[in-house]
Each structure stands twice: as C-alpha cells, then as structure tokens.
Amino acid sequence: MFIKRTAEQILNSAMKRLSENTAITNTQPGSIARTLYEGLDQEIEHLYDYADQIQNMSKLETASGIYLDQIGALFSYPRRMELTIHPITKKKEMKLIADDTYRFEISKRVQVSANANEESLLQAARQVPGVRDVKLIEYVYGPASCALLVSPQNGLNTAELKANIELAISQVKAAGIRLEVWMPRSVQVELTLKLELKNEMTVNEKEQIKEKVKQAVIAYFASFMPGDDFIYYELVQRIMDVSDSIIDFDMVSFLFRNERALLINQFVEADELIELAYILIT
C-alpha cells in the first residue's frame, strides 16, 4: 500500500537514520547535515505527490479527465457525447458526458461485451442523444419479453427519439425476444403564482426575483423522471429558497392532468412523467 509522506516526515526519518547509522550526532536545526537534507525533502515530497497522482489516475475508481479517457480506450470505449437542453432557453448542445457517468459505463463494459444481456441493452439505449436514463422492465408480455422505459430530455421529438433507440438496441437484441421501447406518458402541469415581496424593493428588483422564481420552478420540473410524484412542499421550498425578499406566495391556479387540483401531493404511475406546460408569475 502506498503511504504518502510530507517533507517534514521525510526529513525527520532521514535525521533518525543518519544518527542511528553514522557517527553524525548533531541533526538539530542549523546543523550542516540537516541543512543538506533540507534541500532535498521538498523534492522528495513532490515525487510522492507524483507517485500518488499516478496511482490514483491508474484506477477506474479515482481516475478523471484524460486519464479516465485512457482507461476507456483499453476497453475500446471512448467517451460519448450527450445532448443537453437548457431548461429555460431550450438551446440544444452536445457535450461530453461527465466523469462519473463515463466511469459507471466503463465499469459495465465487461457485461456489455456479451450482447443481448440487460446491461448491453441499457447501454445501447443510453448512448442515444436525448436519453437521460432508461429502465428495463421484464416480462411485460410474459416470458421472453421486456420493455425499455425511457426518460427523455425535455423538449425533444419523442417519436424520433424512440425510433433512434429502437435502431440502437436492434444491434444487440437477441433473436426471439420481444422488446419494446416505451416513452413515458406526459402528465402536464400548469400553474400561476402571485409573489408577495418586501415593499422596499424596486420594480426592477421585483422583476428579477420573479424571473429567478420562474427558473427555479422550471428547473424543479425538469428534474422529474418517469414515476416521480409531485410533492407540493418541495415546490414551496424551491420557491422560498430563491430569495429572502419573498414573504409568501399565492398559488392562483394549479392544473394537474389538465384539471384544477388541490394543493397537495399528486401521484403518477411508473410510466408517467410530470412536465411543466405553462407557468405565469405575477
């Protein structure tokens, strides 16, 4: 096991060995022997730092950046791109996946190398741009049948995304297996909020708070995955956390499943996805 040592530890150890194995007895600060070693302890500490980095960057659990890319290359699995959509502007952008996601996918490569197993299907679907995550549901029509329930990025053409996923998994699906791709059923939410703000705020400051609340609410709903329930007080907390200048707010209108609903928790099925369809803040 590699044990990293500081410059002080290195120097103290060297002085101890020097006094034990040579005729030199004066190793106190200012002595010639100690002064000579003090010129080396920092350099040796840097070598320890370098060795520690090499060890960390050579392991899947701790590697990052280009070092993680090199581990992926050993499995012939380069870091993939993913589609990201800004929750406010809806701007689409392709970005390399984060280290944690890439690390997880590399760890599954041994399983993926055997086609037609669960992990190979999940990985094939996850690599399709626009897929946030995917879950495999077994035996939906009895033996030798399953479905992939997709969590899509917001604002995408779900029909096109489904077709792309079906094409991707067809490359790894075993013959004789009935496999379907399920897109979640949309459960739409519409809401209108009226904020109560501190009186001493200017009109411009109040408008800025309203915009921040809007962004916070949009971000909250954008985080939903299929099967996630709407927890009312989580939304309340998101709103109130925006600024200390918010005294309170009134939910003027709250529509769930296109109907007026009570301001309580709302529950959905495992294949349903809550989506924000409309928001107005006054």
Image: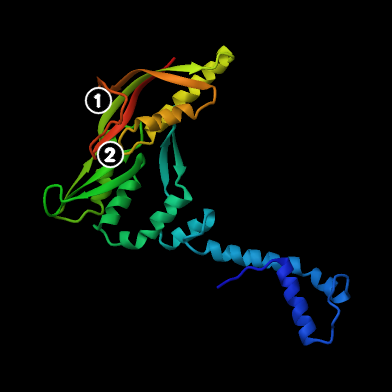
Q: Name the residue under label 1.
A: 257
Considering the image in quadrants, where does the C terminus appear? top left
Q: What residue type is labelled 2?
A: Gly
The mark found on residue 111 in the picture is none
**Image quadrant assignment for residue 88:** top left
- Give the image location of residue 205, x and y in percent: 57, 17
Q: Mark 2 points at which residue?
A: 227
**Image quadrant assignment for residue 238:** top left
Q: Nearer the viewer, residue 124 or 193?
A: 193
- Is 245 on the left or on the right of 8, as rendered? left
Asked if the residue at tag 1 contacts the one at tag 2, i.e. Cβ–Cβ closer than 8 Å, the answer is no
What's the CA distance linking mark 2 and mark 1? Answer: 15 Å
- Is 110 on the left or on the right of 272, as rendered? right
Image vertical order of residue 81 relative to residue 253, above or below:
below
Q: Which residue is drawn at 49% across and 56% down?
A: 69
- Is 282 on the left or on the right of 52, as rendered? left
| Disc 2: CA contacts within 10 A as few (<14), some (14-19) or many (>=20) | some
- Give the image location of residue 21, x and y in percent: 77, 86
- Give the image location of residue 53, x and y in percent: 59, 62
- Give the image location of residue 116, x and y in percent: 23, 57
| Sequence-earlier tag: 2 or 1 | 2
Q: Which residue is drawn at 33% across and 44% down?
A: 133
Label 1 SS: loop
